[in-house]
Image (spheres, rainbow, N blue to C red):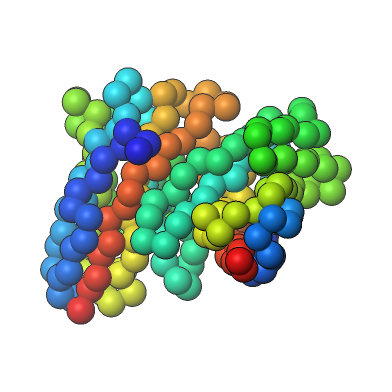
Amino acid sequence: DSGVTQTPKHLITATGQRVTLRCSPRSGDLSVYWYQQSLDQGLQFLIQYYNGEERAKGNILERFSAQQFPDLHSELNLSSLELGDSALYFCASSQTLVGGDTQYFGPGTRLTVL
Amino acid sequence: GEDVEQSLFLSVREGDSSVINCTYTDSSSTYLYWYKQEPGAGLQLLTYIFSNMDMKQDQRLTVLLNKKDKHLSLRIADTQTGDSAIYFCAEKSNYGGATNKLIFGTGTLLAVQP
């Protein structure tokens, strides 16, 4: 158990809908990262937050957004869902931003868009 | 640029050693990681190596880094059926100003035959 929790574990929804994925980082970790794992794209970095502020963006679609709250939990919002958004979404956390700071991953949320 | 490549599949017999290889392109990478993903599960951190090291040993795991060739390998001694999983190599990248995002390889499926 990494100490990172993600809810829900599974999510099934229809095209055009909007969903919210939630992540609670390990106790004391200030940085949260979101990754998407799909068959065709592999594991890709989406976005990073540190202590409530956005720090880096990767291959995140404009239909997707995220935020980190004062209690450090984070939410990833996916809207106008398409079939191709079906994937496993991982959250990871680390203590700070410095090099060598290991990222610990949550169990993931499996999103299926029908 | 950022690109991490791995061979897709490796099959070994129980008790043999497994060697999983990875090549990366970002010469500024300071840390390189190995993660394990079992079926239906999240990513488990196995080990990591700092770029000024050539080798790191951790019980049955040995990581070798050839920085000149940008080549990383993970050796698993006395491979067991429980080691069957997908193994991901990842580099910590600050490319493009991002802070500490991980760039993952395609993953190597290790199949251990009894």
From the viewer's perspective, is residue A77 above or below residue B40? above
Query: Residue A60, can we see it?
Result: no
* Position of residue A7 in the picture relative to residue B19 (left or right): left
The tally of labels here is 0
Q: Is residue B71 left or right of residue A59?
A: right
Asked if residue A29 is positioned above or below residue B105 in the image, the reply reads above
The front one of A77 and B16 is B16
The C terminus of chain B lies in which quarter of the figure? bottom right
Residue sitting at 69 percent across and 50 percent down?
B78
The percent position of residue A89, horizontal first and vertical second, equals 33, 56
The answer to which of B67 and A65 lies nearer the viewer is: B67
Where residue B15 appears, as percent x and y from the top left, is 69, 55
Name which residue lies at 56% across and 54% down.
B83
Q: Measured from the top left, where is residue B25 in percent x and y?
A: 72, 51
Q: Position of residue B60 (x, y in %)?
A: 66, 40
Instruction: State which quadrant residue A32 falls in.
Output: top left
Side of B82 relative to B50 (left or right):
left
Kindly tell me whether residue A101 is visible in this rendering.
Answer: yes
Image position of B106 with respect to B47: above or below? below
Identify the residue shown where x is 42% and y is 62%: B39
Please identify the residue farthest to the right as the structure is shown: B68
**Residue found at x 18% / y 63%:** A11
Q: Please, is residue B102 above or below residue A30 in the view?
A: below
